[in-house]
Amino acid sequence: MSTHASTRPVRWPRRLVRGLFILIAVSFLALFLLLPLAIVFIEAFREGVSAYFATIKQGDALSAIRLTLLVAAIAVPLNLVFGVAAAWAMARFEFHGKALLGAFIDLPFSISPVISGLVYVLLFGAQGWFGPWLDAHGVKIIFAVPGLVLATVFITLPFVARELIPLMQSQGSEEEEAARVLGANGWQMFFRVTVPNIRWALLYGVLLCNARAMGEFGAVSVVSGHIRGLTTTMPLEVEMRYNEYDYVGAFAVASLLALLALLTLLVKTLLEWRYGGEIAAHAPGGH
Amino acid sequence: MRHRILPGFGISLGYALTYLGLIVLLPLAALVWKASGIGIEGLIHLLAAPRTLAALRLSFGSALLAALINAVIGLLVAWVLVRYRFPGRRLFDALVDLPFALPTAVAGIALTALYAPNGWLGSWLASWGIKVAYTPLGVLVAMVFVGFPFVVRTLQPVLESLDRDVEEAAESLGARRWQTFLRVILPMLAPALLTGFALALARAVGEYGSVIFIAGNIPMRSEIAPLLIVQKLEQFDYAGAAALSTAMLLFSFVLLVVITLLQRWSSRWMEKTR
């Protein structure tokens, strides 16, 4: 050995430390993340392929799938428009209270989903602020579809805005100003300059927003009332089947949601690899 | 007025504010209003009830512990993903986001199936005398699961942009590897680590879907605070549910303020030592 080694205690060989670290990290990811995902499909197919498809075709599952798609189809576009409007105001103009507005936009991420559902019960429930008035006019929000949509909108409100704001801030407004100077009107500038510049980040935000909208459980559980076939979304259908000891049925519906999660991860990863630069600059957070 | 030339300030800001006001702020105002209905005495009575205290202790205690575990294991995973090259690295990197993408109810029943006494991991752990499902330990497992991506995803960009010259300088001056890590690298990571910790904590405190299946929800033992809110609601105790919610939001707010202060302090400390 060299004199270098004799002057200090024996070092851990670097390759050993490195191998050990990789081993710990990979086993943690496999055991803690991959295994729960695998178990969903294993449990769903426990009684064979035909039992799996039979339980998915049952009436309640189909209406749950339809309701989930409907809720997401309303909530995601609403938050898309909000996200673009908020990002335009915050990334292109200076005004007082901008930081506060940013904090308010992030608020739904740091509130328990249960509380997100509760606030609408307090507003629109039978004993809520607007409850008696709604009742008198025959409008039902809580324990009905509008409540599910509202709770989902609340939960997924930050996703698009959060992707767009940092990106648009880092891009600056030179191109848009140039378009205006060259005579484009507001909408021309928006659709021909702004949208092409932010399209991948927009898609990224919509993707995450949609995944959460379809998978939300806590908030919709509070406002749903669990009326079979009417107000049960897929995650609620999973819960109801599970509580009725229909494990294969619960995991079968869960496997559809898991597939949605896998698809989301796949598209997200592809977007990050291919258009990393055009999405970048986003702070990680409650995705 | 540099941006005069750009249109749409009034309409975009107006729309965003109205939407945010109607969807988030008005409902939250209703919550605080309803909570104030029970008065200070009612609030103390509610919070001092043994069952409420036990639930709050479990929710905040497990969430703190889960965030701490995530800080340690998240740092290790982020380090391995950024610094080392090994087969399947990109796949594992994509896998980190799974808890964000997987609906919480699905995660909940999957974790329960895995850690139940007759499950794959549960039966193995049971042979060591460790029970996970239907105990407070199960709550912890679910909270670690849902909070896991936050620390990794906040650390990764910072680790990637870290200047390796500093590390090499430290080593050429005779620092050992672990000394370099503790004295040079860790202080530079501290602000991001705290951000990840805070995000994981906030998520775990309020988590509902993935926890209630594995927790077993035994009063005084494995019952989390959000579940208590749901129960009050089901008993039409709206004021109680609102008060407990407001108390939870206040606790979380105070915790997050403390973490933000810590973060400022650590980044200022970094500036000074630079």
Image: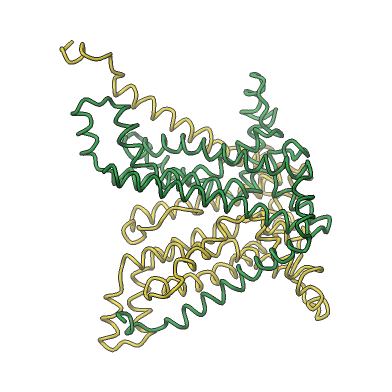
Q: What hue represents chain B?
A: green
Image vertical order of residue B166 relative to residue A88, above or below:
above
> Where is residue B101 drawn, in percent x and y?
53, 51
Q: Toward the viewer: B157 or B43?
A: B43
Q: Residue at x 47, y 83 (%)?
A: B11
Write down the quadrant of residue A115 in the picture: bottom right
Image vertical order of residue B56 relative to residue A137, above or below:
above
Q: Toward the viewer: B106 or B218?
A: B218
Image vertical order of residue A35 relative to residue B14, above or below:
above
Say left or right for B33 vs A37: right
Image vertical order of residue A146 relative to residue B213, above or below:
below
Q: Toward the viewer: A97 or B121?
A: A97
Tally of numbered tags: 0
> Where is residue B241 drawn, in percent x and y?
75, 56
Q: Give the residue at the far front of this rendering.
A: B41
Colour pattern: by chain
> Where is residue A196 drawn, in percent x and y?
35, 72
Write down the quadrant of residue A167 in the picture: bottom left
Q: Which chain did the renderer colour yellow? A: A
> Where is residue B18 drawn, in percent x and y?
56, 77
The N terminus of chain A sits in image quarter = top left
Say left or right for A67 vs A263: right
Say left or right for B218 vs A255: right
